[in-house]
Amino acid sequence: MDDQQLVRIAKALADGTRLGILRTVAKRGELCCGEVGRAFDVTQATVSHHLKILADAHLIESRREGQFIRLKAVRKTLDEFRRALGHGFDGA
C-alpha cells in the first residue's frame, strides 16, 4: 500500500461517523444503506456522502440486491492498512 492510499484511508477514518459506519458494517458482515441511516440518525444525503468517501478509499464495497444496496467491508484493504501502519513505524 502506497502513502497516497494510506492518507486517503486515514482521512476517511478521521471522521467519527465514517469510522462508526465502517465498524458497524464490518461487525455485521453486510448492511443495507437504509440501516446505516437509521443506526446513525443521519439523512440519506449524509449517508451517501460518507459511503462515497469510504468506497473511494476502498474500505467498503456495495452490491445491488433488488431495490436495496448491500454494503460490506473490504477486509483486504483493512488488513493492508493495518500492516502498512505497522511497517510505517518500524524502527521509530
Image (cartoon, rainbow, N blue to C red):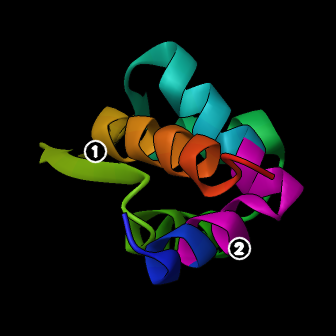
Left or right? Give the position of 43 relative to 49: right
Question: In x, y percent, where is residue 77?
Answer: 37, 47
The residue lying at 71 percent from left, 58 percent from top is: 13
Residue 88, picture quadrant: bottom right
Taking depth in this image into account, of 46 and 19 the one nearest to the observer is 19
The residue lying at 74 percent from left, 64 percent from top is: 43
Rendered-image quadrant of the N terminus = bottom left
Q: How many marks?
A: 2
Residue 66, picture quadrant: top left
Residue 23, picture quadrant: top right
Question: In x, y percent, where is residue 73?
Answer: 40, 37
Dot 2 or dot 1, earlier in sequence: 2
The numbered disc on residue 68 is 1
Amino acid type, label 1: Phe
From mark 2 to mark 1, how far is it between C-alphas?
A: 28 Å
Left or right? Give the position of 56 relative to 17: left
The numbered disc on residue 42 is none
Residue underneath mark 2: 11
Taking depth in this image into account, of 6 and 49 the one nearest to the observer is 6
Could you tell me which secondary element the residue under label 2 belongs to?
helix
Q: Which range is magenta? A: 8-19
Compared with 34, 18 (above or below) is below
Foreground tag (2 vs 1): 2
